[in-house]
Amino acid sequence: MRFFAALLVLLHHSATIGRKYGLFDLENVGLFRNGANAVNFFFVLSGFLITYLLQKEQSQTQNINIKQFYLRRIRRIWPLYFLLIAIGTIFLPLAISISGLDYQMPYSIGQTWYYFLFFCPIMVLHIYGHHLLEPLWSIGVEEIFYLMWGPLVKFFKKHLPEVIFATMGLKIATEVAAYCFFDSSSVFYLLAFNYNFESMAIGALGAYLLFNAKSSIENKLCFKPIVRLPVCSLVLLFLFFNINIDNAVWNALFFTPIVSPLILSFLYLYVIFSKFKDALPQWAVVVLFLSLAVAITLVVSYFSKRWFEDWFLQRNKSKVSK
């Protein structure tokens, strides 16, 4: 799931860059306009996984070790996060200067280091426009959510549903206020619509329901094939053709401000739940297996030939010739 979401982000940015430099224009194809949708899926998945793991730790140890929770998040995220910041603010500008490329960095490290350090990359985008490190804004959102979510789950474990719904309600109220009283250039509007805590809370709600379910989700009617197939098909239809379908029902469902992101978050949560119930039909599993088998075989064969077999062939070539 992470791989396909990341692939959608890659396709989105590639199409945008391609259009900017006149290479190709795929931005009118729905499949290449899923950057925000894929990131929103990441948020739902993050809220789901973190909450499930915290509940599991509480159940097994009767406690949640906040220090270890933070250390795990730091080890997982910070090394790559700060490496990318160093590349984008120090090494890349230096390389551009040395090479003489006709490209002007929109900011310097002196202007932006504190935004990156305190996990507010979204402010760099807001102030200086599009740039190489733009995708890091979502990491900032997740880090701030983790910072507050661990203690909330620990100290309000008996009232976790209330905490989840309060988070969702507060965030939605913030969006409504931003939508009604601020324009898109204001910082409040920017933060309200980019800090997707409501999506993470929806994922957390799914984790709470799954962890505390009194019976297997396989027994639930909503996860029977008769429901699962059309819902998962709807998600796929949206990802492939979101902007290419234009009718009143479709637009109301997927392009209504504030409401549609919530609908999509719940649909993503359903897909995550379906993973526990073998979401893919048998034919899709066969196609996926064969595709992966061929791809992995080609990759392994290439590296085997390039880095292993050729070493023996080259080493003995002169002896064979003699």
Image (spheres, rainbow, N blue to C red):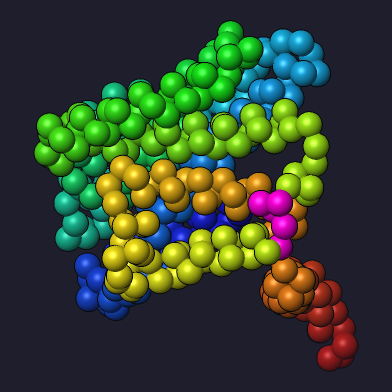
Residue 111 versus residue 232 in the image, above or below: above
The quarter of the rendered structure image containing the C terminus is bottom right
| Quarter of the figure with the N terminus | bottom right
Task: Please provide percent x and percent y for residue 164.
Answer: 51, 25
The answer to whether residue 163 is left or right of residue 220 is: left
Magenta stretch, main secondary structure, is: helix
Q: Quadrant of residue 115?
A: top left
Percent of width and height locating residue 70: 57, 19
Q: Which residues are magenta?
A: 221-225
One can see residue 283 in this view: yes
Which residue is rendered at x = 19% and y = 46% of the image?
129
Q: Most extreme residue toward the front, as rendered?
A: 221
Q: Position of residue 114 (x, y in %)?
A: 29, 24
Q: On screen, 140 above or below 307?
A: above
Quarter of the view holding residue 258: top left
Q: Where residue 26 appears, x then y in whole percent? A: 32, 74
